[in-house]
Image (spheres, rainbow, N blue to C red):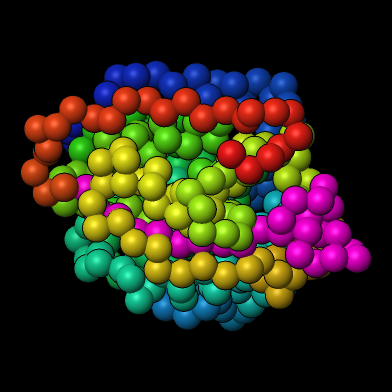
């Protein structure tokens, strides 16, 4: 990608240097990453005659696009990209029932969307690109997905090899790289990311920095029940996830977003999680939501913490940069080692 042309205010030299390093790292295959890249090369000649991104299922191609042997090739490659976390997809007639019913999350966001036609958008932690394909139906100028996990990166590359959407692009970047994109995006989606960050306030500052003045942020996060402005800090894991740090209440998340400088902050949806939305499927045959919850009390995680909710929030960056100094960094730490609410 020509970052300098697409994002003139970005630190393009540093970005390209990092991505070159990542490409070289994958090529060395020290962690077996070529098992995702090499199958892609076997289907690069196959392209969809039809795509539909307007419905709950992202549809890429039809069965009639392929010969029986090509169908088998595609099926083998798609199965090799398991586990599928986001979906659903239909790829040349192969129906992929992913772990997450991602259309449910998207349908909660749709009524809150600003006009997206001609906009530059970022999807942070985009996974296999499900939401990026859904965004394509709104005719944005460009959507950049940030995805540091190699498996998800190559899953998107495979899908877009078939779909050929030139305004969708995923790079091996994480939320920590947003500081290299000052004032670059009209809209940013940060879905299911903040509770994986050891400093969610710093992450929100980077999101604020990367938005253009007047731009919109959409955040979706795990949350704990309650109205107090507090966050759970688990001792080790939360719902069996070791990479979970702070799980806020909706009020706490609202306060974080407001204190870093966003305006018009509003929680527009909150609901309990359930196995109707996240579950094991033939395309994701590992543990899922029902394995994370106390089987005797569905209101508790397997560790004994309050069972997770999901909270949705939107906020706006001021149209004109504020003259106020940014708020000081907030240090949030547990007051004991038991994972209490703080």
Identify the main secondary structure in magenta: loop
Q: Is residue 278 above or below residue 182?
A: below
Q: Quadrant of the C terminus?
A: top right
Which quadrant of the figure has residue 326?
top left
**In the rendering, at what x and y percent does residue 146 appear?**
45, 42
Q: Can residue 160 be seen by looking at this rendering?
A: no
Name the residue: 51% across, 30% down. 332
Number of numbered tags placed on the structure image: 0
The residue lying furthest to the right in this view is: 296
Q: Looking at the picture, tell me which residue is in the foreground, 152 or 270.
A: 270
* Front-lying residue, 277 or 322: 322
Quadrant in which residue 153 is drawn: top right
Note whether residue 327 is visible: yes
Asked whether, in this view, residue 26 is left or right of residue 15, the answer is right
244 shown above or below 42: above
Q: Is residue 286 left or right of residue 214?
A: right
Please state the extent of the stretch shown in magenta in the rendering: 293-317
Residue 215 x, y percent position in the rendering:
22, 51
Quadrant occupied by the N terminus: top left
Q: Quadrant of residue 78?
A: bottom right
Residue drawn at x 70%, y 52% is 81
Is 318 on the left or on the right of 10, as rendered? left
> Is residue 306 rendered magenta in the image?
yes
């Amino acid at each position: 990608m020509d970052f300098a042309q697409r994002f003139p205010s970005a630190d393009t030299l540093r970005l390209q240097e990092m991505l070159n390093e990542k490409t070289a790292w994958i090529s060395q295959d020290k962690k077996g990453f070529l098992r995702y890249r090499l199958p892609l090369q076997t289907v690069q000649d196959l392209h969809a005659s039809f795509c539909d991104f307007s419905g709950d299922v992202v549809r890429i191609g039809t069965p009639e696009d392929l010969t029986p042997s090509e169908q088998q090739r595609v099926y083998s490659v798609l199965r090799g990209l398991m586990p599928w976390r986001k979906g659903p997809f239909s790829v040349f007639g192969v129906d992929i029932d992913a772990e997450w019913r991602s259309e449910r999350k998207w349908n909660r966001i749709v009524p809150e969307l600003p006009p997206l036609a001609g906009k530059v958008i970022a999807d942070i932690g985009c996974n296999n690109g499900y939401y990026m394909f859904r965004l394509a139906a709104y005719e944005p100028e460009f959507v950049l997905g940030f995805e540091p996990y190699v498996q998800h990166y190559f899953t998107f590359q495979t899908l877009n090899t078939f779909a050929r959407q030139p305004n969708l692009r995923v790079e091996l970047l994480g939320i920590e790289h947003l500081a290299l994109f000052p004032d670059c995006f009209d809209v940013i989606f940060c879905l299911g990311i903040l509770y994986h960050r050891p400093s969610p306030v710093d992450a929100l500052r980077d999101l604020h920095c990367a938005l253009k003045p007047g731009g919109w942020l959409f955040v979706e996060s795990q949350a704990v029940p309650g109205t107090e402005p507090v966050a759970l800090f688990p001792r080790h894991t939360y719902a069996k996830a070791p990479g979970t740090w702070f799980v806020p209440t909706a009020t706490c998340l609202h306060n974080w977003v407001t204190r870093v400088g966003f305006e018009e902050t509003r929680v527009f949806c909150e609901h309990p999680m359930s196995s109707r939305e996240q579950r094991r499927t033939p395309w994701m045959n590992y543990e899922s939501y029902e394995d994370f919850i106390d089987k005797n009390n569905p209101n508790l995680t397997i560790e004994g913490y309050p069972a997770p909710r999901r909270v949705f929030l939107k906020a706006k960056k001021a149209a004109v940069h504020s003259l106020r100094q940014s708020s000081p960094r907030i240090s949030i730490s547990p007051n004991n080692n038991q994972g209490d609410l703080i």
